C-alpha cells in the first residue's frame, strides 16, 4: 500500500553523497538523524576511510563522470519506492577553484564535475540538494561556468535555493575556513543556517584550538600514540626541529634567528604562515591537504616541537575521535584537508530538517 505524503515526510531523509571523500559531509548529516544510503568517490584511500566509518552504506568507487544515472535504481534499493525524502549531496573537489592552487586554469578537467552531478539532479529530482565548495567556484564564469548552469537547472526545476559564502568558524568549527554553500529544496522555502558563533550570534566567541586539541596526550615528531587513533605526527629534520623550537606560540619564521632562516625567504615577505605555530586562544588557519606539514602552512602545534598530528587535524575539522582514517600519512592529511567540516555539514543538515518540519513533519 503506497504511503501518504504525510507518512513520507515523517521518515528519515535519505542521503546520496556523490563526492563523499572520507565522509565529512555524511558524518554531519548523520549527526542530525539522516540515513546515508549511497556514496560515490574514486579516491582509493578516501574510499577505504568512508567504508570503515559507514559500513552499511552502499558505496561505489567510480568517477562520477563515468557513472550512468540510470544505474541508481539498480544499485540502491532505498531509491525504488522513494517513500522518504531524498537529499543529493554534491561537494565536488575544490582544487580547480581554489586560490591556493598555483596551477589553477580554466581547462582543469575537474571544473565540469558540478555539471555531471547536475545530470543526477535533473534525472531524479531529489527533494533536497547540497553543494559545498570554495568561494572561487563563483568566479570561474558569471554566465557559462558550472555554477550558473547548475543554478539555472535548479530554477527551471522549481527548487527554492539559498546560497552564499560562509565562514566555518561561525558554526563552531575551530578554523578560519571560508566556503560557498548552496541549499536547494522542492519541499518549501529554505534558508542558510543562522550563525551560532561570533559577534552577534548566540555564542559571542569563536571556538578555539585549545578547546579542541589541548586534552590530547603529548607526542614527539614522528611518533604515533599507542591508544589514541590517528594521533600520529610527521617526522622533522634536525634543522626543522630547531626552527619549531625557536617559534613562539602563534609565531612563525620571522621569529627565528638568522642562522635558521631559509635563503628563499630572504627577499620574500609573503607566505608568513609557513612554519608557523597555531595559537591556543583562536581558531586555526584553514587546513589544507598538507595540514600536518610544518613547511606548508601555520600547522605547527602551539607548544610541542612538531606539526599537528592526524588526529589533531581531524579534530580541527570537527571529526569525532571514533572516526578513524586509513592510508598513508600524506593520504590521511589529504582526506582531512579535503573534507567538509563535520559541524558545518551538521548545521547545513539542520536547515533541511527545518524545512522538512515546516511541511508538516512531526
Image (cartoon, rainbow, N blue to C red):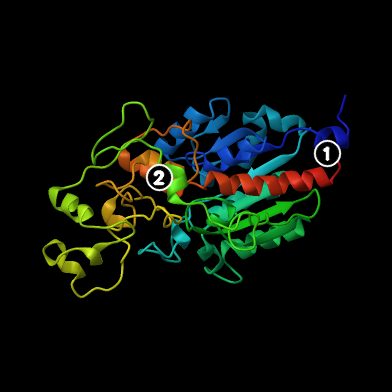
Which of discs 1 and 2 lies nearer the camera? The answer is: 2
Mark 2 lies on a secondary structure that is helix
Could you tell whether 9 is left or right of 195 in the image? right
The disc placed on residue 313 is 2
Above or below, 242 against 47 in this view is below
* Element type at mark 1: loop
| Snapshot quadrant of residue 282 | bottom left
Residue position for label 1: 361
For this view, does 342 lie left or right of residue 104? Answer: right
* Residue name at image x 86 percent, y 42 percent: 360
Q: Which mark is residue 195?
A: none
User: How far apart are the two marked residues, 1 and 2, measured between alpha carbons?
Assistant: 37 Å
Residue lying farthest left? 259
- The x and y percentages for residue 273 are 33, 62
Q: Is residue 12 left or right of residue 307?
A: right
Residue at the spot 71% in from the left edge and 43% down from the top edge: 124
Badge 1 or badge 2: first in the primary sequence? 2
Q: Position of residue 11 (x, y in %)?
A: 77, 32
**Which residue is pictured at 36% across the width and 55% down the height?**
278
- Looking at the picture, tell me which residue is in the foreground, 24 or 46: 24
Q: Which quarter of the rendered picture does the C terminus lie within? A: top right
Rendered location of residue 1, percent (x, y): 88, 24
> Does residue 125 appear in the picture of this structure?
no
Seen from the viewer's position, the closer of residues 286 and 149 is 286
Amino acid at each position: 500500500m503506497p504511503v501518504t505524503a504525510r507518512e513520507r515526510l515523517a521518515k528519515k531523509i535519505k542521503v546520496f553523497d556523490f563526492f563523499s571523500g572520507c565522509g565529512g559531509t555524511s558524518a554531519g548529516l548523520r549527526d542530525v538523524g539522516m540515513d546515508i544510503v549511497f556514496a560515490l568517490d574514486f579516491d582509493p584511500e578516501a574510499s577505504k576511510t568512508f567504508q570503515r566509518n559507514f559500513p552499511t552504506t552502499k558505496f561505489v568507487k567510480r568517477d562520477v563522470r563515468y557513472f550512468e544515472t540510470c544505474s541508481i535504481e539498480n544499485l540502491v534499493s532505498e531509491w525504488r519506492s522513494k517513500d522518504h525524502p531524498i537529499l543529493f549531496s554534491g561537494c565536488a573537489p575544490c582544487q580547480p577553484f581554489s586560490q591556493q592552487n598555483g596551477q589553477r586554469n580554466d581547462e582543469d578537467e575537474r571544473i565540469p564535475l558540478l555539471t555531471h552531478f547536475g545530470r543526477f539532479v535533473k534525472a531524479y529530482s531529489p527533494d533536497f540538494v547540497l553543494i559545498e565548495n570554495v568561494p572561487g567556484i563563483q568566479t570561474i564564469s558569471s554566465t557559462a561556468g558550472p555554477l550558473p548552469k547548475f543554478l539555472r537547472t535548479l530554477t527551471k526545476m522549481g527548487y527554492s535555493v539559498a546560497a552564499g559564502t560562509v565562514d566555518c568558524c561561525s558554526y563552531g568549527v575551530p578554523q578560519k575556513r571560508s566556503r560557498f554553500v548552496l541549499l536547494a529544496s522542492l519541499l518549501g522555502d529554505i534558508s542558510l543556517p543562522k550563525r551560532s558563533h561570533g559577534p552577534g550570534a548566540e555564542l559571542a566567541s569563536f571556538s578555539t584550538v585549545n578547546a579542541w586539541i589541548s586534552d590530547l596526550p603529548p607526542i614527539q615528531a614522528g611518533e604515533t600514540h599507542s591508544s589514541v587513533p590517528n594521533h600520529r605526527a610527521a617526522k622533522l629534520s634536525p634543522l626543522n626541529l630547531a626552527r619549531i623550537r625557536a617559534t613562539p606560540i602563534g609565531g612563525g619564521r620571522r621569529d627565528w634567528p638568522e642562522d635558521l632562516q631559509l635563503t628563499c625567504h630572504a627577499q620574500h615577505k609573503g607566505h608568513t604562515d609557513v612554519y608557523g605555530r597555531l595559537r591556543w586562544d583562536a581558531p586555526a588557519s584553514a587546513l589544507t591537504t598538507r595540514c600536518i606539514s610544518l613547511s606548508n602552512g601555520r600547522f605547527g602545534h602551539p607548544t610541542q616541537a612538531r606539526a599537528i598530528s592526524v588526529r589533531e587535524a581531524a579534530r580541527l575539522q570537527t571529526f569525532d575521535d571514533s572516526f578513524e582514517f586509513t592510508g598513508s600519512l600524506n593520504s590521511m592529511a589529504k582526506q582531512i584537508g579535503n573534507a567538509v567540516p563535520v559541524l558545518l555539514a551538521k548545521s547545513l543538515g539542520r536547515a533541511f530538517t527545518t524545512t522538512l518540519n515546516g511541511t508538516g513533519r512531526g
